[in-house]
Each structure stands twice: as structure tokens, then as C-alpha cells.
Amino acid sequence: MSKSKKTSDDRVLEALKKKPTNTYEFRKSGVFSPSGSVARLRRKGHEIETVERSLVDDFGVRRYRVAEYHLKGADDE
């Protein structure tokens, strides 16, 4: 794998720098295990808060306790 390719961790961090992002938004962008990426980013020192939300998915089904991730200090980086 080329070093120029972005990892899922890179994509998660880029998205969180722009705005809080939930599990469904990550999956739509090709990151199918955002919780794993978030855990690795936390170990690297990034302060990421998880907030549970409910939402209606693309099929009209209400989903409860969907993780939404917030990067603390995103303006500082």
C-alpha cells in the first residue's frame, strides 16, 4: 500500500476537523468501523467526545443511540 493513500483514521480525523460526524455519515464515506479509528486516534492523543443521538436513516427507520463524534480543540490544529 502506498503511503500517499489515506487510511480510515486519516479520513475520520479530517471529517472531525470539519464538523461532528456520526456513524452513518462515516459509513456513507467508506469508513465502516469509525469506533476503531476513534479509539486509535484517542490513543494518539486526540480528544474526541462521543455523544449518543437518535436519527432517521435513509430508509426512514429511527435509529437510537447512534454515536456522534466531536473533536475537541479542532480549531487549535
Image: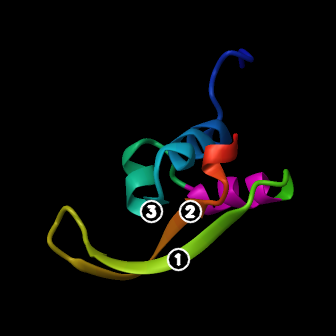
Q: For mark 1, give the secondary structure.
A: strand
Compute the Cα span from label 3 to label 2: 9 Å
Looking at the rendering, the stretch of residues picked out in magenta corresponds to 33-42
Residue type pointed to by label 1: Val
x%, y% of residue 46? 76, 54
| Front residue of this view, candidates 7 and 21 | 21
Q: Which residue is mark 3?
A: 22
Residue 38 on the magenta segment: yes
Q: Of helix, strand and loop, which mostly describes the magenta segment?
A: helix
Residue at 78 percent of width and 59 percent of height: 42
Binning the other alpha carbons within 10 Å of mark 1 as few (below 14), some (14 to 19) or many (20 upward) gives few
Q: Nearer the viewer, residue 34 or 47?
A: 47
Comparing 49 with 29, the one in front is 49
Q: CA distance from mark 3 to mark 1?
A: 9 Å
49 vs 19: above or below: below
**Which numbered disc flags the more N-terminal residue, 3 or 1?**
3
Q: Residue at x 71, y 15 (%)?
A: 2
Q: Which residue is mark 1?
A: 51
Q: Is residue 35 magenta?
A: yes
For badge 2, the amino acid type reads: His
Q: Earlier in the sequence, mark 3 or mark 2?
A: 3
Mark 1 / mark 2, whichever is N-terminal: 1
Label drawn at residue 70: 2
Residue 48: x and y in percent read 67, 63
Q: Residue at x 74, y 17 (%)?
A: 3
